[in-house]
Each structure stands twice: as C-alpha cells, then as structure tokens.
Amino acid sequence: MKEPKIKFDHVTKIFETRNQSITAVKDYSMEIQEGEFVAILGPSGCGKSTLIRMLDGIIPTTSGDIYIDGQKVNHEKKKMPQEVLRKMGFIFQQPNMLPWFTVRQNISLPLQVFALKGAKWEKQVDELLEMVGLKEYANAYPSEISGGMLQRAGVIRAMVHDPEILLMDEPFGALDELTREQMNMELLDIWSKTGKTIVFITHNIEEAVLLSSRVYVMGTQPGRLVETVDLNLPRPRQLSMITQPEFIEYRQKLERFIGKIDLSKIK
Ligand SMILES: Nc1ncnc2c1ncn2[C@@H]1O[C@H](COP(=O)(O)OP(=O)(O)OP(=O)(O)O)[C@@H](O)[C@H]1O
Ligand SMILES: [Mg+2]
C-alpha cells in the first residue's frame, strides 16, 4: 500500500502551564492519503488547532510521531526542514494580511520565504489571482477589499508556493453564511482541479459533510479522537445536496457523536 501523505501515530500533547498540565491531545492516530479531503470536527478546546500546529512544526509533540510522506517530522529540538515545510500551505481563521502590502505583495510572501524567484512564480501569482476573481484588486491594499475577498486572498496565499497539502484552520468561520457557502464551493473547485491533500478544521457539521470524504470527530478533556466517519456521498458536491436524505443522515450521525452541542454558537 502507498505511504500515507500524513500520519499521526499515537500523538499526545501536554501543555505544562504554571499551575496545571493540560492534555490538549491524547493518543491521536490518523492516516490521510494523498489527494484526500478530510475534515476535523469538534467543540472548542478539543485540540484541533494543536493538531495542525504540531503538523506544521510550530510546536513539538509530547509523545508519539507525525509523518509526512513517510518522513518523521516531529524531531525534538530540531526545526522542520524547508523542503518539508514547503509541502504545506496554512490557511488561518483570520486572513492575517499585512496592511502596508498590496494584495499581490501579500500573496507573494511565501515565495520570499521559500526563495522562489522568476517568471514561473510570477505567473503562478497571476493565475491564482485570476482564479479567485482578484485580478483587478491585485494592487489594492487589504483595507480596500471586502472580507470575502480577503479570505480568498488568504486561500491563494497558502497555495502560491504550490504546496501538496493545505491545512485550513476554520478558514471561513468569520464570514457570513452566503459568502461562506460560496467559498466552500470555490474550495471544492480548487481541490478538484489541483488534487491537493486538504485537512479542513471546522465547528460546523454541515460544512464538514458538504466538503470532505471523511470526518474525524474529536471530543474534549482530554482532546481526543472520538469517531471516524467515512462519507459516502457523490462528487462533485453541490449545495442542493444538504436537503437530501443521505446528507441529513450523516449530519444527524455526527450530531449524535458531538452530543448535540450547537457548534455554530461556539466561537
Ligand atoms: N500554548 C498553550 N499553552 C497552554 N495551553 C494551551 C496552549 N495552546 C492550547 N492550549 C490548550 O489546549 C487545549 C486545546 O486547544 P486548541 O487551541 O487546540 O483547541 P481548538 O480545538 O482549536 O479550539 P477552538 O475551536 O476554540 O479553536 C485548550 O484547553 C487550550 O487551552
Ligand atoms: Mg482552534
């Protein structure tokens, strides 16, 4: 069998603070194959961001190992190698654009980080701007464009160095419902065109079912994997599917696992 793109092998993360130790993630294992679109779903504080931050090398694991393409990436006290970092693009909950840079300059930042120069990469920036309808706004500043446009800029900034994996930590949580639905459909379109591996974190059950092929359901105290649900729904996915019986069945199943918490109200 092919090496998984991403593998968590019994990963635990304990944060030691001044007066307590918090088990943010306990004994977490999962395997994601190349080109899969998976969702991680769970209530606030269950360790979703911690998982992504360990995968991206921002924080080390306490025990257990993380692999990308079979390569162990959680080396203790050692920074993640550039060639592994380059495989990943990170999309945050907030767009985090630098206000004194134009949209184009903001989007091009990863190219500077990874020292990628030349016409090929400039063309890549142009194509991505075009793809998400931001070409006319390339020279605008972040304060001059809408929230949805900013979020789109965040998505393509994570893709500009052509990563193989997109890590998305509640990327559309701050958007209104309509823009969010539009962004979700655009993301599915990007995914089907590029074949990237996508790990999508969300509080939103409907969003998880609409987008992904498998949902990892997490619980709190300690943060842990509660259930893995494979979604047998046809692709391409369409918004109209959310009223279909198969969709509703998955949604209700996930609601039962989460314990009927109204996740949309948790921020
Ligand atoms: N640097 C840190 N130091 C101490 N505790 C931390 C740190 N980072 C996270 N935690 C704790 O670990 C737990 C998991 O946090 P994490 O941010 O991963 O949750 P989350 O699932 O992403 O939540 P949310 O949905 O609200 O973003 C929480 O109890 C949090 O307080
Ligand atoms: Mg989080």
Image (cartoon, rainbow, N blue to C red):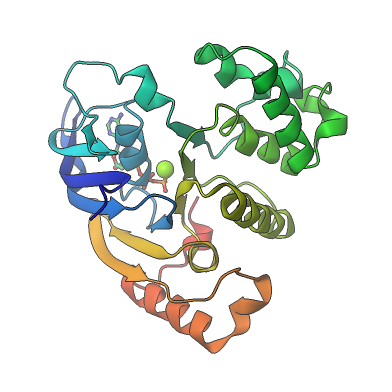
Q: Name which residue lies at 29% across and 39% down.
A: 69
The quadrant where residue 12 appears: top left
Look at the picture and state if 118 lies above or below 1. Answer: above
Residue 84 vs 221, above or below: the answer is: above
- Above or below, 185 against 259 in this view is above
Q: Is residue 22 visible?
A: no
Q: Position of residue 253 (x, y in %)?
A: 38, 79
Specify the farthest residue to the bottom: 245
Tell me the quadrant of ligand 1.
top left
Q: Position of residue 248 (x, y in %)?
A: 51, 82
- In the rendered image, residue 47, in percent from the top left (x then y), is placed at 31, 46
Q: Is residue 104 left or right of residue 18?
A: right
Q: Quarter of the image holding residue 181?
A: bottom right
Q: Is residue 170 visible?
A: yes
The quarter of the rendered structure image containing the N terminus is bottom left
Q: Residue at x 66, y 59 (%)?
A: 185
Q: Is residue 265 above or below residue 127?
A: below
Q: Position of residue 199 (x, y in %)?
A: 43, 48
